[in-house]
Image (tube, rainbow, N blue to C red):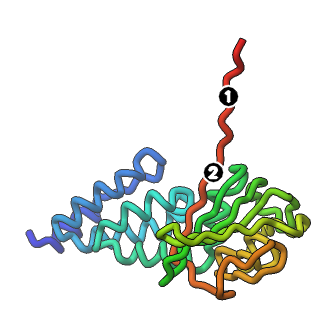
């Protein structure tokens, strides 16, 4: 039986489970289908995830994207994930980062040895409003750690822009809008980049947890 005939036979009988436990089996099935060159079956799984599993995909975006990146046959699903990020990166950001408390955002700039970022002591909430604090700061750091700039907030009323739009989310009125690649001094003490626009290659958000020291009795 040819690989095409085998794939068609499997497609007639396959029933993809939609509960959380069995969704992880998608990738076991993809691995087997990819190894056997069952192109139709791989395409069927991709179409199913794209059309029927967007909620699950967004909820587990990082883990899923890491898994599918290792399969050349899943190019359609990889492109779909990339499109989700490009079309609305703020949706994924807020889904993963809202109500997680104090955090540090670190941004890798495309074509540059410098990373930028900011400290948000209040956390993100999609409030679509300004959040006031005297403790936030933004920074830039070269990869060799020989050059570093820390810029503390000087206008606490515009310290954190907690918007749902990628064009505004970040620190100050343009001091560092990390999803949109904007860096224009306004509400923080110093300029952290020589340019006012940059391309975001990647970013990470680190949750800051306070360690509670045990009380000696």
The numbered mark at residue 38 is: none
Q: Residue at x 71, y 51 (%)?
A: 102
**Rendering coords of residue 175 (x, y %):** 75, 77
Q: For the N terminus, which image quadrant? A: bottom left
Q: CA distance from mark 1 to mark 2?
A: 19 Å
**Residue underneath mark 1:** 213
Residue located at (40% from left, 62% from top): 66
Q: Is residue 35 visible?
A: yes
Quadrant location, the C terminus: top right
> Secondary structure beneath disc 1?
loop
In percent of the image, x 53 and y 70: which residue is there? Answer: 146
Circle 1 crowding by C-alpha within 10 Å: few under 14, some 14–19, many from 20: few
User: How busy is the neighbourhood of tag 2: few (under 14 within 10 Å), some, or many (20 plus)?
Assistant: some
Across and down, in percent, residue 172 comes to: 80, 73
- Is residue 69 positioned above or below 113 on the image? above
- Among the two numbered marks 1 and 2 on one chain, the one whose residue lies closer to the N terminus: 2
In this picture, residue 110 sits left or right of residue 118: left
- Horizontal placement of 38 versus 86: left or right? left
The residue that label 2 is drawn on is: 207
Q: Quadrant of residue 192?
A: bottom right
Mark closer to the observer (1, 2) = 1
Instruction: Give percent across and percent down for residue 165.
Output: 74, 75
- Find out whether the residues at labels 1 and 2 contact each other: C-beta distance under 8 Å: no
Q: Secondary structure at mark 2?
A: strand
Task: Look at the picture and state if 117 lies above or below 28.
Answer: below
As rendered, which of 57 and 52 lies closer to the eye?
57
Q: Is residue 185 left or right of residue 93?
A: right
Which quadrant of the figure has residue 35?
bottom left
């Amino acid at each position: 039986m040819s690989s095409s005939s085998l794939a068609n036979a499997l497609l007639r009988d396959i029933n993809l489970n939609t509960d959380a436990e069995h969704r992880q089996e998608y990738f076991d099935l993809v691995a087997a289908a990819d190894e056997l060159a069952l192109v139709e079956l791989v395409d069927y799984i991709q179409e199913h995830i794209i059309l029927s599993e967007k909620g699950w995909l967004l909820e587990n975006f990082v883990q899923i994207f890491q898994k599918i990146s290792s399969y050349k046959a899943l190019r359609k699903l990889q492109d779909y994930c990339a499109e989700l990020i490009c079309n609305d990166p703020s949706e994924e950001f807020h889904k993963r980062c809202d109500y997680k408390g104090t955090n540090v955002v670190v941004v890798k700039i495309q074509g540059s040895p410098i990373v930028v970022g900011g400290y948000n002591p209040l956390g993100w909430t999609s409030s679509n409003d300004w959040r006031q604090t005297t403790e936030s700061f933004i920074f830039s750091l070269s990869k060799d750690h020989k050059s570093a700039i820390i810029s503390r907030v000087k206008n606490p009323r515009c310290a954190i822009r907690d918007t749902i739009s990628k064009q505004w989310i970040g620190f100050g009125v343009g001091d560092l809008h990390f999803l949109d690649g904007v860096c224009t001094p306004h509400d923080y003490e110093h300029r952290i980049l020589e340019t006012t626009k940059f391309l975001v290659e990647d970013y990470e958000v680190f949750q800051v947890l306070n360690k509670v020291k045990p009380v000696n009795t």
